[in-house]
Image (cartoon, rainbow, N blue to C red):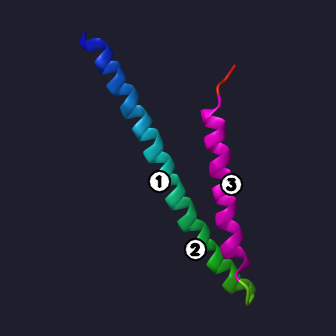
Amino acid sequence: MTEPVQNKKKSDNSLLLKYAGLATQLLIGLGLAVFTGLKIDRWINIKTPVAVWLLPLLVIAALIYKVIKDTTIKK
C-alpha cells in the first residue's frame, strides 16, 4: 500500500523541480536580457531604450514556446 504513495510523491517532486527550473530560467534569462539590453543601448547611444524592451520580450516569448512545447501531449 505504500507503493502508490511513493510514486505520487516522486511525481510531485519531479513536477516541483521542473517548475522550479523553469522559474530559475525565467529570472536568469530576464536578468541577462535587461543587462545586455542596457549595454547595447549605451553602445548604440539611443535615447529610447529599444533593446531593453525587445530582448526581455524575446526571452518571454521563447519561454512561452518552451512551456507549450513541453506540456503538449505527444502522439
Dot 1 and dot 3 residues touching (CB under 8 Å): no
Q: Which residue is mark 1?
A: 24
Residue drawn at x 32%, y 26% as measured from the top left: 9
Separation (CA) of disc 2 from disc 3 = 18 Å
What secondary structure is the stretch in magenta mostly built from? helix
Among numbered discs 1 and 3, the one appearing first in the sequence: 1
Q: Which residue is mark 2?
A: 35
For badge 1, the amino acid type reads: Thr
Residue 43 is labelled as none
Among numbered discs 2 and 1, the one appearing first in the sequence: 1
Secondary structure of residue under mark 2: helix
For badge 2, the amino acid type reads: Phe
Q: Is residue 9 magenta?
A: no
Among numbered discs 2 and 3, the one appearing first in the sequence: 2
Secondary structure of residue under mark 3: helix
Residue drawn at x 48%, y 52% as measured from the top left: 23
- Nearer to us of marks 1 and 3 is 3
Give the magenta part as a residue range.
49-72
* Within-10-Å neighbours for mark 1: few <14, some 14–19, many 20+: few
Q: Position of residue 10 (x, y in %)?
A: 35, 26
For badge 3, the amino acid type reads: Ala
Residue 61 is labelled as 3
Q: Is residue 75 left or right of residue 4?
A: right
Asked if 39 appears above or below 12 in the picture, the reply is: below
Secondary structure of residue under mark 1: helix
Asked if 71 appears above or below 5 in the picture, the reply is: below
Q: Position of residue 7 (x, y in %)?
A: 35, 19
* Within-10-Å neighbours for mark 2: few <14, some 14–19, many 20+: some
Q: Based on the displayed image, in which of its 4 quarters is residue 52 positioned?
A: bottom right
Residue drawn at x 40%, y 27% as measured from the top left: 11
